[in-house]
Image: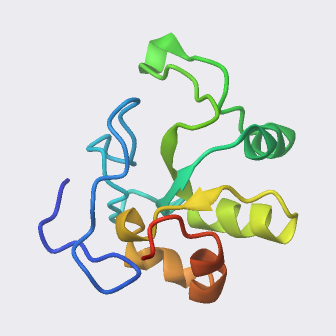
Amino acid sequence: MQNSESINVLGEKLEICGTDPETGFYRDGCCNTGPDDVGSHTVCTVVTEDFLAFSRSRGNDLSTPVPAFGFPGLKPGDSWCLCAARWQEAFAAGCAPRVRLRATHQAALESCNLADLKAYGIDLS
């Protein structure tokens, strides 16, 4: 569901988050969202070991491969579209991963504070 009208949190065209592994709710490499994406997978991150451990502790193991779903499992340094509420939860816990703002969908702002996202931004010049 790649949408040429998708806008990032900076008000610009949404950039690709990651293709190895293929990320996004629609597995289109972008943090696009739509009515089926109830988790709002809209924050483009570069995951860390701390975040992966945090996510596992919250019941979402992103490290373990799930071949039946074509999921290779994530490792530190992978780009991944996270649920906005989970990123905010990790931020509050002090273990949020860095954010690629140009690839983070504006819908993330429904759950995340722009100043918090910018504080973790890795693509601002």
Q: Is residue 124 above or below residue 43?
A: below
- 21 in relation to 35, above or below: above
Quadrant in the picture for residue 18: top left
Q: Would you identify the image quadrant in which residue 87 lies? A: bottom right
Residue at image location 72% in from the left, 39% down from the top: 60
Between 33 and 115, which is closer to the camera in this rendering? 115
* Quarter of the view holding residue 31: bottom left
The correct choice, above or below, for 37 with respect to 121 in the image is above
Q: Quadrant of the C terminus?
A: bottom left
Asked if residue 47 lies left or right of residue 100, the reply is right
Residue that extends furthest to the top in the rendered view of this protein: 67
Please give the name of the residue rendered at 21% of the width and 74% of the height, measured from the top-left corner: 13
Say which of 76 and 41 sits in front. Answer: 76
Q: Position of residue 8 (x, y in %)?
A: 34, 75
Please state if 7 lies on the left or on the right of 84 as rendered. Answer: left
Q: How is the image coloured?
A: rainbow
Residue at 18% x, 55% y is 2
The image shows residue 61, relative to residue 43, as above or below, that is above
Q: Specify whether residue 31 is in view.
A: yes
Q: Is residue 120 left or right of residue 66?
A: right
Quick one: which residue is furthest to the front in this view?
A: 125
The answer to whether one can see residue 111 in this image is no
Q: Tell me where residue 1 appears, x and y as whole percent.
A: 20, 53
Closest to the observer, 14 or 121: 121
Instruction: Tell whether 100 sits left or right of 7.
Output: right
Residue at image position (45%, 21%) is: 69
- x and y percent of residue 9 in the render? 41, 80
> Which x, y percent locates residue 43?
50, 63
